Image (spheres, rainbow, N blue to C red):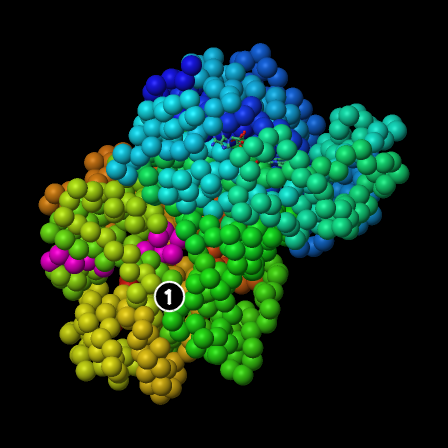
Amino acid sequence: MLPKRARVVVVGGGVIGCSVAYHLAHMGWKDVVLLERDRLTSGTTWHAAGLIVTFGSTSETSTEMRKYTRDLYTRLEAETGLGTGFKPVGFIEVAIDEDRLEEYRRVSAFNRYCGVDVHEISPREVKELFPLARVDDVLAGFYVKEDGQANPVDVTMALAKGARMQGATILEGVPATGIIKKGRAVAGVSTPLGDIECEYVVNCAGMWARQLGAKAGVTIPLQAAEHYYLITDKIPDLPKSLPVLEDPASHGYFREEVGGLMIGLFEPICAPWKVGGIPEDFSFGEIAPDWDRMGGYVERAMSRIPASLEVGVRKFFCGPESFTPDLAPVVGESPEVKNYFVAAGLNSIGILTGGGLGRVMAHWIIDGRPDVDVTGMNIDRLHAYQTTPEYRRTRTVESLGMVYQCHYPTRSMQTARGAKRSAIHDRLAAKGAYFKDVSGWEGADWYAPSGEAPKEQELTWKRPTWFPYWADEHKATREGVILMDMSFMSKFLVEGRDAGRILNFISANDVDGRAGMITYTQWLDELGKLQADLTVTKLDDDRYWVVASDTAHRHVLTWMRRHMEGSHAHVADVTSGWAQINIQGPRSRELLQSLTSEDLSNEAFPFRTAREIDIGFARVLCVRITYLGELGYELYIPTEQAVHVYERIVEAGADFGLRHAGLKALASLRMEKGYRDYGHDIDNTDSVLEAGLGFAVDLKKPGGFLGKEAVLAKKAEGPLKRRIVQVLCKDPEPLMFHAEVVRRDGKPVGYVRAASYGHTLGGAVGLAMIEGGGAPVDAKFVESGTWEVEIADKRYPAVASIKPLFDPGNEKIKR
Ligand SMILES: Cc1cc2nc3c(=O)[nH]c(=O)nc-3n(C[C@H](O)[C@H](O)[C@H](O)COP(=O)(O)OP(=O)(O)OC[C@H]3O[C@@H](n4cnc5c(N)ncnc54)[C@H](O)[C@@H]3O)c2cc1C
């Protein structure tokens, strides 16, 4: 019998749906109904290889989910009586070239910091553990003894039983045919057997999730792709309890399977499957393998285990798995429909993260907010244009292959490019811009010297050949004047009688003072934790200009809309209508003054002022603000006049030595100044005080603000026990990117969340969240310690600082 109502309806009975139902029920929400179209596991889960691996991610959230999952699969049998088939046979990842060795050393240091017991082992030790493997070209292995393999069907059945034991209802053979909405919120789910009224829906429909989402207007740009493994015939004398071996450079992983080997593949160029739509009746299905496409990859993978070439192939299996545009899952509440949650797009790691993801989802739904950093996987990072068939067909060719690529810090996705270009894109290209993918926009990353074309993408852990060009752009910003196109920034016009009141309520800073002022602020949740980091410019009493980074686009928009419901305040997304060109550097005032009739003197146009000015035939919103730590201006120009204004600036700029600067320079300049970047060095788990942003919180403004009580409570707790600290490597040589472990007096105390190279400071510089281990993280703590950063297993002396190491007195920006 179909229940008439439930608090939560989970759609999809794969590992993810069952894990969500299990965790909701365990956390006390027992009124849960899970609908499975056919039978549990009939989508992708039934044929997964079942690798359970905690090594390999530089995301703290992903690593925590992996660890939790492994623990859960170990204990589910005791709880439910159903085994998960988890065998801790161990896991080894081998590096066969210097670049991979560099990567795995960096990752393993970070993973150890997160509690994964991973060890670097010699080729001889690899051979001892996996005697069938050829190790002549292996440089090292990375070994986690506690990892291994599980049986995905058994895992799912155990989760389903655990959910039922806690009171959840699981119905097989009942498809969700649509989502019923009331206004902009979930009200129920329709099925062929009738409707179920509900408060929450969780779309865990795997590769069908996009189609189901589209029915309710929810954007879920995932796409199924062919995914392969083969199973060999029995191999004589195969050692018992072989560990799982992974050799990404040969595209393969290897594990024991009924006396033979399972050889799984991640080919570098992949094949999307059923771009037009996944058939509704595809159950326990297989795809006919494409031997022609895969033959070379199979050979390469098998050559790692010569014995596999001596026996026959019992089964060459191909099944579909969902992939997303950036290889992160699609998780969280949809911006379009309130209480419509999604957990899908698992990019081939749904089994090994499934337990943890279910826990995160249940927490998010029950508490109204997640308890881990979700900035990298939140559904609201994705955009509608990414759901077009052409986009999915194009991008998916690259995404599955990315899993086994070396994850170079200089890499940008190469497919589905050119989707969004700023109005001055062609001009920047003519100036020698090298472009990278910036939330789908072509963002100028750095510029080749005059007369040279930028080279193709350079993949390296070392200094790329363009390092000196980047250094020049950085220097030009510190000493002269530069032009930077930032048209990809998210721009919103907020208008209405209630606009100022509501914006001021959701902002921790006072954004509703004098018109013509820009204010840097954070938006907090009730716990005083960060939801956004942006600027609000008051244009007039009922008109505001809100600017956030590209990645925060839909999060910021949704946060505003949800807080403005029912009021006289309206948000227009004007990102496309306005180009943003920044003119920054000590000579920026001189340059702009030569182009406008407005007085730009420090007295007439001080720091934080915003005003319309004239440039040529255009009227431009000019805001005196900087993200680079220099005197500077952001120009917002109607898109159709962007080229004209650009031409005027470049023409006049010749007399001032104007240079173009790209996003590499943006990263290094802002990092020297310690300016934060939401989703990179600060996230939704940090309180505004821990993020070091207390200076932007106005506790005295009338009416208070969302999160104020929590900020006051945090202050009352006394000195902070964790805090963002800037870290500079004293040795100018090594490079930091992300996830380098920071040590104080030899002990690990945190890791670098984002880093760049400080061309002015003379070394790699980053922002790290430092845990004091009970001690206050204050100036004394910082000054009294001896600091080091660990880069690929080597320790380097470092300077740590709470105040920005560059221009701590803000003299440069206010001159
Ligand atoms: C060859 C291969 C090997 C893999 N190996 C591994 C591995 O070693 N380790 C690992 O972690 N991951 C592995 N994976 C990935 C893993 O299998 C997936 O990430 C995971 O199974 C995804 O689970 P899911 O619940 O999101 O999707 P699914 O298992 O597809 O579940 C979705 C469910 O939703 C149901 N459904 C769809 N639409 C509706 C509807 N309208 N109403 C009701 N129900 C609906 C479907 O019937 C289906 O049962 C592998 C995948 C493949 C293809």
Q: Is residue 539 above or below residue 188?
A: below
- Identify the residue at horizontal 41%, vertical 64% (top origin): 666
Considering every residue shown, the one lying at the far bottom of the view is: 655
Residue 117 makes an appearance in the image: no
SS for dot 1: loop
- Identify the residue at horizontal 77%, vertical 25% (top origin): 258
Left/right placement of residue 97 relative to residue 551 reads right
- Quarter of image, res 142: top right
Q: Is residue 19 above or below residue 765?
A: above
Whereabouts is ligand 1, in terms of quadrant? top right
**Which three-letter amino acid code belongs to the residue tagged 1?**
Met
Magenta region: 541-553
Residue 298 makes an appearance in the image: yes
Q: Position of residue 466 (x, y in %)?
A: 55, 70
> To which residue does mark 1 refer?
486
Q: Position of residue 704 (x, y in %)?
A: 15, 42
Asked if the magenta segment contains residue 285, the reply would be no
Front one among 235 and 207: 207
Quadrant assignment for the C terminus: bottom left
Front one among 204 and 480: 204
Quadrant assignment for the N terminus: top left
- Quarter of image, res 546: bottom left
- Identify the residue at horizontal 64%, vertical 26% (top origin): 150
- Quarter of image, res 687: top left
Q: Position of residue 225 (x, y in %)?
A: 60, 44
Left/right placement of residue 584 relative to residue 465 reads left
Q: Position of residue 350 (x, y in %)?
A: 56, 34
**Quick one: label 1, few (<14), some, or many (20+) residues within 10 Å?**
many
